[in-house]
Amino acid sequence: MKKATCVVLTLIIIALCAMPAFAQKQDYPFIIVSGYSSGNLYENYGTDSQKTIWPFGVGDALGQTLRDFPNFIRCLAAFLLGNGAPLGVTVAVGGEIILEKMYTNPDGSSKYDIVHYPNDPAISSYGYLLDNAPDEINEPELCAYCAEKTGRDNVFLFQYDFRMGAYDCAQELNRYVKDVINFTGSRKVNIFGMSYGGFITGAYLSLFKDTAPVNNATLDVPALGGTSFTRRFFLGETEFCTRSLIALAESLIGAETNLAPVLRNLDLSRLEPVVEAFLKEIREMPLTWGSLWDLLTPEDYTELKPMFLDKKANREIIRKSDIIHYNVMKNYRSNFLACMKRGINVSIICNYVDYTAFGGEKLADMLLDARRTSGAVCSDAEKCFPDSYKPAYTVCANRSHRHLAPSMQIDATSCYLPEHTWFIKDEYHGCYAKDPYGFGLVKTLLFADKRMNVRSDKAYPQFNYSRAPYRSVAADFSDCAPGYINKDGSLVITNLSEKSAVMITAVRMNSVKLRLPARRIIAPGKTLSLDCPGSIPDGHSTLTVYYIKPALGRDIYHRTIGFVS
Ligand SMILES: [Zn+2]
């Protein structure tokens, strides 16, 4: 009997070893759909006269700087730091001459024969691109991470012409997913969509909800519902907000600089007309780009369509953008639920900060309104809900779920997916790779081997704050979720820096000063524990940590974090 058991076990082991190596969930090929204007566009592609049309070529340095919007901001930052040449060139040479090839026909198609790098899986894996076409690689930190996890030839970069609307790009993504499946022999793919890429992915999941062979779909700061900025762009109402620029530039530089003191003595007002003129000039060109139309909110689209588009000449743009606004955007919840019913794990990450890049009051991640990204009810930027605020409960009415952000700025009960939407306060648009927490969340969702919700991993609650080194300090109560008060615990202040010490000069909770220990210098990555303040009222509280970074001089900075008990 014993011998028989051994034989059976041995046979089972042999059988298991001999089984074909079916792809584990973690081994699904990865498709990365990157953000707006991040891909290259070419004229006469593959011929001797091939020319890069986007990013446009006014010298390599400038071309590189203008590669995408964040780089454009970096270029502006250089101007602020005293190097005005790149921006001067941009404005002087910019406009119609440089951008002529970017014009589109009244039907939204390209006026010239402009193409992106081919979406052929054989030549668009991360491994192939590293060796042969490194310029086509976007989201390099994520690519490198995914390559480490699943192999560099199992990570694929989808390319698209960012002038085209989400409808066209979603059709192209559908073909690419099928091609990657055929190429790799896998049953499914994992998809990461960033910003406009998240919008394309959302449109793809909506339009192909019954067939999309997807395992995990992680949409990071996706432009799902458009954004109020687009309307302002169309109407030439953009304002230039210096404070936002400084903050975003700091974040993009990503280190631990603090530009504010450097900029304090500069006359920033001279910059504002330059940028406004640039934006006004550039806005004429994309009026027949499907993407710009799709990036309007449904309400703004309905209002602006008759003002700018001709029913006959622009019929195709209207037809496709109608589908996006009146079909896709209106039905994200039911579309995503249909996907999830088929086993697709859809996750959304929404960032928000208290600035907007180009004016306006909407709570946004600098560019995209948090409400449109997530479906949540949001306060205006720099405001919060009153203490008496009652959640909407329009999508999730479960009173035991804590869908109200400790910042009192987000009510997630009305999200497209209240249980699968994560919010990161103080994190700018597209900056996940600069924030260990944000990047950790992306990695966790992308590689999850089961469906995650906002309660399934304590390390990744629905609401958290950026832990980017640039944010210098974080504050949490021990043994509870970020932003929640544990009256029996202590207050833990963390130095987020990787290399500089911080000295805490004061901590105030609801304007009450907390007692600090004698030793207030925190080494990089270390923490300082304070006794829990004695009298914390129920409801919303505001904690402000004041600090000095000795490496940056004696200036006192502060970070304010909202808490609820
Ligand atoms: Zn819920």
Image: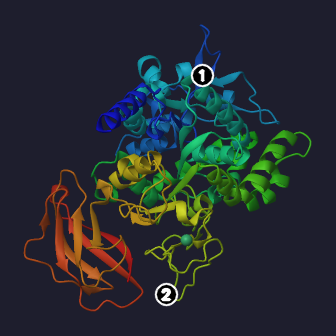
Give the residue type at disc 2.
Asp
Residue 180, quarter of the rendered image = top right
Q: Residue at x 28, y 92 (%)?
A: 535
Q: Residue at x 67, y 43 (%)?
A: 204
Q: Foreground: 8 or 533?
A: 8
Is residue 333 found left or right of 442 in the rendered image?
right
Which callout, 1 or 2, points at the residue further toward the start of the chain? 1
Query: Which residue is denoted by mark 2 in the rendering?
Result: 387
Q: Are marks 1 and 2 in contact (CB under 8 Å)?
A: no
Q: Foreground: 496 or 411?
A: 411
Is residue 509 found left or right of 245 in the rendered image?
left
Above or below: residue 247 compared with residue 189? below
Above or below: residue 45 compared with residue 190? above
Above or below: residue 142 compared with residue 490? above
Residue 60, quarter of the rendered image = top left
> Residue 56, can we see it?
yes
User: Where residue 90 sits: x, y (%)?
Assistant: 52, 36
Above or below: residue 140 compared with residue 129? below
The disc at residue 120 is 1
* Quadrant for the N terminus in the image: top left
